[in-house]
Image (spheres, rainbow, N blue to C red):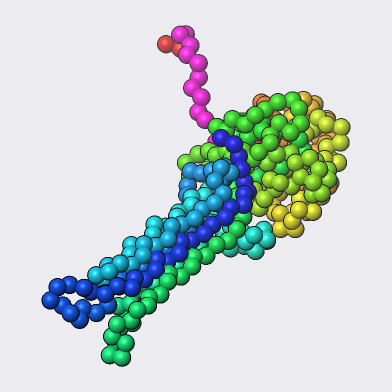
Amino acid sequence: MKFLDQCKIYIRSGNGGAGAVSFRREKFIPNGGPDGGDGGKGGDVWIVAKEGLNTLIDYRYQQHFKAKTGTHGMGRQMHGANAEDIVMYVPVGTEVFEEDHETLIVDLDVEGKTYMLAKGGNGGWGNTRFKGPINQAPKFALPGQDGEERWIWLRLKLIADAGLVGLPNAGKSTFLAASSAAKPKIADYPFTTLVPNLGVIDLGPEQRFVMADIPGLIEGASEGAGLGTKFLGHVERTKVLIHLIDGTQDDPVGSYKVIRKELNAYDEILGSKTELVAINKCDALDKDARKKLAAKIKKVSGQNPFLISGVTGEGVRDLLFAALETITGEKLEEAHPTPDVPAPYNPMDT
């Protein structure tokens, strides 16, 4: 399924049905009087956050949503039926903006959250409503109220607890694949990941969190270079950022500074999020190279970096448990217990 995280759509609620002008005309009832019914209410337009959706692709093929007009009133005081509402389902984490793309209408950040985007017009009164001692035979009724119309923007921000950031080919997709059941595309060329990927990290009973792999940033991304900051909005809701650095590249320190610069340029809040720094591909470094590189990264980041390898799995669980501790705010007593492995069978022991 193609990933789409923002789109512009047109919505319009239904008009109210018109009231009826009618008079009772029956045999032996010479003074029947008015009996026009009211019109029905126009349909509303609602938007609902639904679990299980992760893209706005449905709104690429349908951009106009118009509710129907309420049924008009009829004689014999028969009121018109209300029109059906339109309900649009979107992924949890979708934000709805006005046409200016800046004014936030509603943030659908909780499953089942519902919001009325456009209210249908009320139905008009029939002439029965206006009869009285002075005007006993009113010959007029009210038209239904007009519905509301507007253009809106939908923008999806994936709900994830942790976000993976780093330069292209830093090994983010490999790390996600090694940590979860996700199957992102992995290759030896830049920009392998073109859309965000989600993976559920399962570290044990009640020790799970969701991690998002964000397509690689490059220098100048905040000004539109490469994929720009198109997908950085998906890590705005995260509680921790996992910053992966390719330990085999020529300038790991420079790559760290590039990503930090782009994060701060995109949003101050994003740039101030808790960050865990990890040097990836350590399986290709010897002991001395690891030590020297870790010291350099610590100097610029202010923290001891994790030494990991997405290929061999070295250090991965330590990093994941550190991320879980940051997300939950609780210190885990036993981060990664070693499973009991039975000794090999030896016939001489019997």
Give the total number of marks visible in the rendering.
0
Up the image or down, 36 lies above or below 269; here it is below
* Residue at the far bottom in the pictured view: 134
Q: Can I make out residue 226 in this image?
A: yes
At x 76%, y 45%, the residue is 228
The image shows residue 330 at horizontal and vertical percentages of: 57, 52
At x 60%, y 58%, the residue is 151
Q: Nearer the viewer, residue 263 or 316?
A: 263
Looking at the rendering, which quadrant does residue 61 occupy?
A: top right
> Which span of residues is magenta-colored?
331-348
The image shows residue 145 at horizontal and vertical percentages of: 46, 70
Q: Nearer the viewer, residue 271 or 19?
A: 19
The image shows residue 87 at horizontal and vertical percentages of: 45, 54
Q: Quadrant of the C terminus?
A: top left
Is 17 part of what is drawn in magenta? no
Q: Nearer the viewer, residue 281 or 34?
A: 34
The image shows residue 167 at horizontal and vertical percentages of: 77, 38
Q: Is residue 256 left or right of residue 330?
A: right
